[in-house]
Amino acid sequence: MVTLPASLTIEKIEDVISKICEGQGNQELALSISSKDLAFGGYAAAIQAVNTWARFNEKRELVIKASSAEVEEQLANIVKSPHKFTAAMMAKTANLNIEPNLDVRKAVNSLAKAAIEHQPANSYGQHHGRLCWYSFVDHSTKGFDRNFYLSSPTQHATPQSLEQITNIISSMVKKSSTVAGGGVLPKAESVNELGRMFYELFVNTHEHGSRDKNRNAWLKPASRLIYTYGINLTDDAVSNSINNDEALQGYLAALKNTNRSTNRFIEISIVDAGLGYCGRWLADNPKDGILDQISISEEYEILKKCFKFRSTSSNSLVKGNGLPAVMANLTHLNGFMRVRSNRLALYRELTAAWRDISNKAKNLVS
């Protein structure tokens, strides 16, 4: 059994991912009811750990650690937490760890169905405190939220326009910022840059992160999740949150020179259960190698191709400018990006250069 800890620090979650990848197949996944240390990528890292577990596991048996709360409250907590929600959607079985074990999969699925059907009612989607999110369960009929997709009776759903998705991210950012408190909402120009960045990432995960090696086949099981999270912490709390993260420490040190706040942030994450940047590229370009057989250096070079203008895993001549636009807008916004894909863990910040944070890709980045 592998346990997703209550403390969602990237360091601890990376340890969980290593255990999943290196352990025996078909390990049960145990969930703690409580969660803490959510800021600076905790939710995204936990969701990715869940997706990794699902990919390495045919049985996909979920164990929910019991607490003193009533059963109904425990199940509601799962639906309100994106990483637990994702675990429930990817699992084949879900048992509440009480005596005797209680099969709660149907009950959780019923709550999840209601939550997904209700999420389009608000432009900011599902909402819990300073967290706003949208879930897309691609192996079900719940993969196409109307705020993000145009539906058609004659063809597959297609993403909404840039303007519509910019409006959505604006609503999510506003809601997360307001609940977090103390923040100043981004100016219209910054919102547009956020919208373009968010739009490109969403389209990327729709086109690349939801498909199997054969692009005509959707991954099963598969889920995607998009969230915004408002961060408003004291200096000591920020310091404690990034205590073991040299990448974020360097970013905050650089941010101080821009006269931007180093206490208030908006975290935006998109996580999918896809093949990863390198996995997708090699599926579309098999002549470039096989994922299990190429070196980490070669994997890194492929990832860089994905973020270069007119480099795309698809063969369309109109593709290839989306991810470079993400990088440009990230720089304008004085932002920080963490990419965790296949064997790579990289970040890019104010210096506009990729850096390694994984210790798995040493000597790759100057």
Image (cartoon, rainbow, N blue to C red):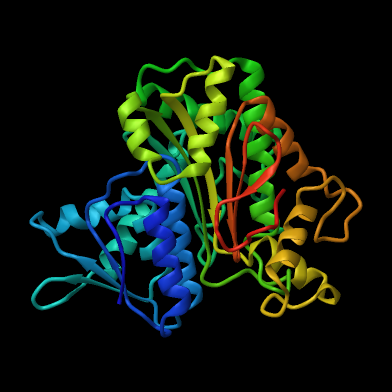
Which residue occupies the foreground of this view, 131 or 159? 131
Residue at image position (27%, 54%) is 6
Quadrant in which residue 62 is drawn: bottom left
Residue 37 visible in the shown view: yes
Q: Please, is residue 351 above or below residue 143 in the view?
A: above
Q: Which residue is drawn at 72% across and 65% down?
A: 297
The answer to whether residue 39 is left or right of residue 302 is: left
Q: Can residue 153 be seen in this view?
A: no
Identified at 57% across, 27% down, the residue is 254
Q: Which residue is drawn at 17% across and 71% down?
A: 97
> In this rendering, would 117 be left or right of 281?
left
Q: Which of 2 and 206 is in front in this view?
A: 2
Q: Which residue lies furthest to the right in this view?
A: 317
- Residue 144 at x, y = what percent? 57, 53
Q: Where is residue 348 in the image (x, y as percent from the top left)?
A: 64, 41
In-front residue for pair 146/39: 39
Q: Left of 197 or right of it: where is 298?
A: right
Residue 53 lies in quadrant: bottom left
The spot of residue 153 in percent (x, y) is 67, 56
Q: How many labels does the image show?
A: 0
- Looking at the rendering, in which quadrant would you find the N terminus? bottom left
